[in-house]
Each structure stands twice: as structure tokens, then as C-alpha cells.
Image (cartoon, rainbow, N blue to C red):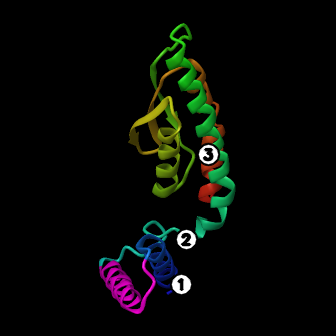
Amino acid sequence: MIRVLSLIFVLSAVWLLLSGHYDTVFYGLGAVSVALTVWVSARMKVIDHEGHPFHIAGRVFIYFPWLFWEIIKSNIDVARRVLSPSLPISPRVFVVQASQKTAVGRTIYANSITLTPGTVTIDVRGSELEVHALTEASAEGIQSGVMDAHATRFEGTG
């Protein structure tokens, strides 16, 4: 029941923020939209810990700033290499183990790798992620396990 209430709150907040209209007719349309969406989601049985992982919501305030800082650092590195062709690149593909216990955790980890410029998650096979890195330094950054540890803490299993 708490996941249903949480989903109603999240959908309502997103609808209000994105609609930009604040009068009775739009509130009614929003309420109908949210109710229909929650009803369909409940019938499909997708309001579970993976479909609506609100249990990790509090950790967003720790993980996202760290991830944004990593994205900024990687952006600067990639921009320097684009603007200064004398800087070396050494593209490579490698496999890294993911220590997350859930599909949501592995998805967060894989997407975090892809969001960081210079690295892309190519494939996920169980707990193994195939990653392409633009430079040796970015490959070492992923292989060091720092991002994996942060994603595991964000997931709540580490």
C-alpha cells in the first residue's frame, strides 16, 4: 500500500511540475490521469521494489552529487582530448564485475558508467558488464571499483 501511495505522490508531483497549469480543470484531469496510471500499474503488478524503488530515494542526495561530479570531471577530460588532438586516446573494451545484488542496482551502475563521458556500457550478462572506454585512465577509473562501490551503497546492499 505504501508503494501505491508513493507512486500517487510522485506521479502527481511530476504532473504538476510538467503541466504548468494550475486551475480546477487541469487538477481534475491530472487526478484522472494519475488514478488511471496507478490502476493500470496495479493491474500489471509493476508496483514493486523494482518497478517503484522508493526505498533508495533518500540515498539520491548522496549518490547524485557524487555522480554529477564524476560526469563533470569526465566531460572536462573528453573535451580536452577533443580540443587537443595531441592528447592520447586508447580505446578499449573490457569486462567488469558488478557487485550489486538486484537488477535495479546493476542498471544504476551500468547507466552511471554510460552517463560518464568516455565510457559506455555495451552489454550486461548477469553480474558482468562489458564496457568501452575512450582512454586508459577512464578504464582504470571503472576497474578501480569506486563507481561500483558507490552504486552498491546507493542500491542499499553494500
Q: Residue at x 53, y 84 (%)?
A: 2
Mark nearer the viewer, 3 or 2:
3
Kindly check if marks 3 and 1 are in contact, taking CB atoms under 8 A apart as contact: no
Return the x and y of residue 49 as percentages of the image width and height.
49, 70
Q: Which residue is mark 3?
A: 67
Secondary structure under tag 2 reads helix
Q: Residue at x 40, y 41 (%)?
A: 124
Whether residue 19 is in magenta: the answer is no
Label 2: which residue?
54
Query: Which residue type carries mark 1?
Result: Ile
* Disc 2 + disc 1, Cβ < 8 Å: yes
x, y percent for residue 59:
66, 61
Mark sitting earlier along the chain (2/1): 1
Marks 3 and 2 sit apart, C-alpha to C-alpha, by 19 Å
Quarter location, residue 39: bottom left
- Can the viewer see residue 143 in this picture? no
On the rendered structure, is 57 left or right of 119? right
Using a 10 Å C-alpha cutoff, classify the residue at mark 2 as few (fewer than 14 neighbours), some (14 to 19) or many (20 or more): some
Residue 123 position within the rendered picture, expressed as x and y whole percent measured from the top left = 38, 38
Mark 3 falls on what kind of element? helix
Q: Secondary structure at mark 1?
A: helix
> At x 44% / y 34%, what residue is drawn?
120
Which label is found at residue 2? Answer: 1
Residue at x 59% of width, y 57% of height: 155
Sequence-earlier tag: 3 or 2: 2
